[in-house]
Amino acid sequence: MSQDKRSLILEERAEKLAKSLEEKKPENVADVLKFQLHQEIFAIEIRYVAEVCFLKEFTPLPCTPAFVYGLMNVRRQVFAIIDLAILFGSQKSTSHKPERVIILKGGNHSFAVCTTAILGVESIPFSLIQPPPPTIAESQSVYLKGITTEGVALLDGASLIDSRQLIVDEEIDG
């Protein structure tokens, strides 16, 4: 086989492969990190995820709302740890302790959320995301983009990070 014919065959193969990759890539998808917290499965767009780390040591913070799990130090940066299960109305679980945290960052704000398991990164087509059900309170649904057909709660990273409700800035009289 001549060099010209070989080059022509390779070019044709490359074009076919490039076209098939373009056709398979959906345009309207959310690239998310899926995680579990107790019995619930959540997902958040990876653009809001700074890192995932083990929850080795943390300091409980007295006189804060129940959803504030505590504080942790990661490489000399202190992050508040938020328990999304409590924020969304579940009770604190004593049988499933959080093993890891997901550090979320956006703008000038950052904090960590508890998780009992990291399930992986995947792409979810927006067509599979339904609005939050009407049974979810408005104070909680503001943090949700929707629910997938598989029952995964897709968090609204921007709403979580920019939320004034999650900022604890009160003083107590002592």
Image: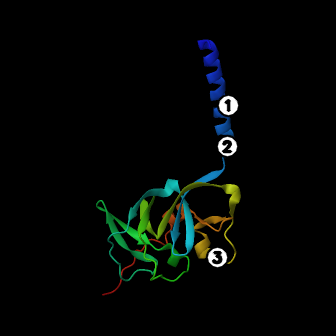
The circle on residue 38 is none
Q: CA distance from mark 1 to mark 2?
A: 12 Å
**Residue 20 point in image, percent of width and height:** 67, 37
Q: Quadrant of the N terminus?
A: top right
Residue drawn at (35%, 82%), measured in percent from left and top? 62
Q: The C terminus appears in which quarter of the rendering?
A: bottom left
Please name the residue shown 63% across and 23% down the image.
11
Q: Quadrant of residue 107?
A: bottom left
Residue 107: in sight, yes or no? Answer: no
Describe residue 6's horizontal placement relative to residue 160 as left or right.
right
* Among the two numbered marks 1 and 3 on one chain, the one whose residue lies closer to the N terminus: 1
Q: Residue at x 61, y 71 (%)?
A: 141
53 relative position to 161: left or right: left
| Among numbered discs 1 and 2, the one appearing first in the sequence | 1
Alpha carbon separation for disc pair 3 and 2: 35 Å
Judge depth for marks 1 and 2 and give the one in front.
1
- Viewer-closest of 18 and 174: 18
Residue 28: x and y in percent read 66, 50
Residue type highlighted by circle 1: Lys
Image quarter of residue 114: bottom left
Q: At label 2, which amino acid type do we have?
A: Lys
Q: Which residue, given by chain and number where applicable, does mark 2 sit on?
A: 24
Q: Which residue is mark 3?
A: 136
Determine which of the numbered discs, if any, sits on residue 16 in the image.
1
Q: Position of residue 83 (x, y in %)?
A: 47, 74
